[in-house]
Structure formats: C-alpha cells, structure tokens
Image: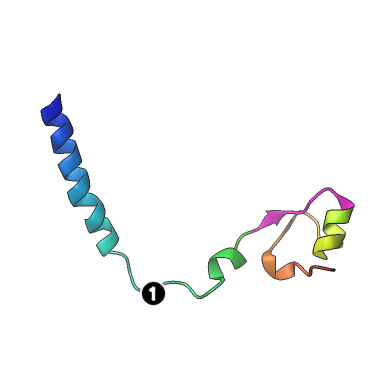
Amino acid sequence: MRYLLAIFFCMTVIILPARGARADNTGSEYGDVLAGLKFRVPEDVEMRKYLGIEGIKGTFTIAQVKIVR
C-alpha cells in the first residue's frame, strides 16, 4: 500500500507542474473575468435601488451596476 501511495505522490508531483507550464501567455485584461459574470437580480426592491438596476429583469453584469449613495 505504501508503495502505491509513493508512486501516486511522485506522479502527482511530476504531472501537476507540467500542466501549469503549458498555459498560454495571453492572459486577460483587468476586469475581463468579473465583467463577464452574470448575477441574479435581487428580489429586494431596496437592494435593486441601491445597485441602480431597477429596470433590469433576470440577470445583470457588474458593468450595469450604478451604486447610488
């Protein structure tokens, strides 16, 4: 059993860094990942008013939020 665990550990140590080395260097611009996410419109009227998304139905993105203070 120890022999199998040792082999599994060694393979994990060898394979995981190799996967990260193959990543491309294109990357994403600042805010690209978060800007693409969609969130459910809150049911609470006050929260929708706070976020500035009163007229939006279903889902919204971060770009649509206009926080009212």
Q: Looking at the picture, how far across and down is residue 47, in whole percent?
A: 83, 55
Residue 10 among those drawn in magenta: no
- Residues 26 and 68: in front is 68
Using the image, determine if residue 57 lies above or below residue 29: above
- The residue type indicated by label 1 comes to Thr
Residue at x 83%, y 65% (from the top left corner): 52
Q: Looking at the picture, how far across and down is residue 67, in whole percent?
A: 79, 68
Using the image, determine if residue 54 lies above or below residue 4: below
Span shown in magenta: 38-45
Secondary structure of the residue carrying numbered label 1: loop
Q: Looking at the picture, how far across and down is residue 21, in whole percent?
A: 25, 63
Quadrant where the N terminus sits is: top left
Residue 41 among those drawn in magenta: yes
Using the image, determine if residue 15 lies above or below residue 21: above
Residue at x 68%, y 55% (from the top left corner): 39
Q: In which quarter of the image is residue 17?
A: bottom left
User: Seen in the image, is 27 located left or right of residue 17?
Assistant: right
Residue position for label 1:
26
